[in-house]
Image: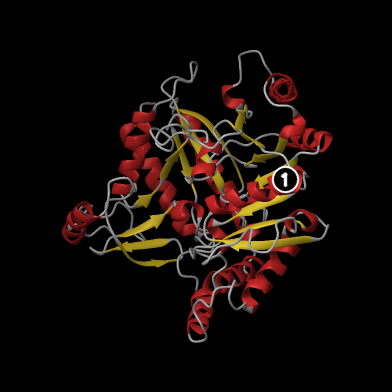
Amino acid sequence: MQSTTKKFIQLNTPIPGPKAKELLKLKEKNVPRGPFNTVPTFAVKGEGALLTDVDGNTFIDFAGAIGTLNAGHCPHKVVEALKEQLDKYIHPCFHVMMYEPYVKLAETLNTITPGSYEKKTFFLNSGAEAVENAVKIARKYTGRKSIISFERGFHGRTLLAMSLTSKVKPYKFGFGPFAPDTYKMAYPYYYRRPEGMTPEQLDQEILRRLEDFFLSEVPAEEVAAIIMEPVQGEGGFIVPSKTFVQGVKRICEKYGILFIADEVQTGFGRTGKMFAMEYFDVIPDLMTMSKSIAAGLPISAVTGRAEIMDTPAPGEIGGTYGGSPLGCVAALKVIEMMEEDRLLERSNVIGEKIFSRFKQLQQKYESVGDVRGLGAMCAIEVVKDPVTKEPDKELTGRIIQECNRRGVIVMGAGLYGNVIRILSPLVISDEQLEEGLDVLESVFADIVKH
């Protein structure tokens, strides 16, 4: 199979190729079917925004390990820092003997996260674990038990995080019962707002419902926290208005409810600012982070107001592998890269280029119902009809599969499975970005009706 482009994509064999097919047999025999895979092949090398598989095929990566690789595959500064750390110690466990990188990273996050108040940070392994611990801290601090999340929100796959998540299949079906005292409220979806209703009216209606919720379901004095993604990731890259986010924060302040910002996917430059909450001029009480914090090393963080974070007593929060030295060292280098390589500016440039190309697709194809995003967090929503806005999950899947077959790795999202999202590394070159978008455009030209 020959590549349809010349510079970066190199497709030497069909996908999967012969080596990948052998590994797939081994995988099917030894790994359960539950963990999903976007591309049916196996990586042997990653560099920047490129991935090469076992058969020598090179792909442009628009998935970035589901938003984990804002700094790119194997960034040189991170790799060198990890090699240096490996020669010192790997994991003495912070709960046994402490180490400096943990404290340095906590100090750094306390400085760069929104809010000028005194903050404290501790570390875990995954986004879901960060969410679980943020909820634990909120409950401990407030003495309340109930937690409110939002429709289409995604907060992880562990029991409590899964309970807060709002998508039945594939995340929750058959895995109940779920954690008690968790509730969901509406979240603005302006593309699908009721006919005749303005975005402003939708915001006010949802905020009114939230106030009514305290009368009809759970009294406000029993609600510990409201957790919100400032841009819904898995939910379809849905961006709320500043009015809505500030409205939720005002309600939290009115009733003594903590506001938790889940920045697991939106953080570390994805939206063109270090953290997406900066767009809304809202300072959260607690913030969860993971994914692009450390260029692919498993680490997550909870940062928040010092008086809140200090509520749990020694031993009440933590974990054996939380804040591993390797993850801390990698994160410190990533944050350094963000500044030195001006990746926030780069995120906005990437976003402008993607948004422009997506708008062109929208003008050309009725199937492109909506184009949205912040910074480099961009998506298109695929529909069967521009008037009814009926989701087209089947066409979305075909587009994604064909892009992957042609050497561009893209992923889907959305409650209806009809959103194509872009999470490319922020170190992607203009040439790589344009080549990947050219492939996406060629797929539309070949399989989507005008």
Looking at the image, is 12 positioned above or below residue 87?
above
Q: Residue furthest bottom?
A: 87
Q: Which image quadrant is residue 305 in?
A: bottom right
> What residue did someone put label 1 on?
279
According to the image, what is the colour scheme of the structure? secondary structure
Looking at the image, is 363 positioned above or below residue 321?
above
Out of 36 and 385, give the one closest to the viewer: 36
- Number of other residues with Cα within 10 Å of mark 1, as a class: few under 14, some 14 to 19, many 20 or more: some
Give the tally of numbered discs. Answer: 1
Looking at the image, is 18 positioned above or below residue 416?
below
Q: Residue at x 48, y 33 (%)?
A: 167
Percent coordinates x, y for residue 36 in the rendering: 34, 46
Percent coordinates x, y for residue 199 in the rendering: 69, 24
Q: Residue at x 74, y 36 (%)?
A: 242
> Which quadrant would the C terminus be assigned to in this image?
top left
Q: What amino acid is at disc 1?
A: Tyr
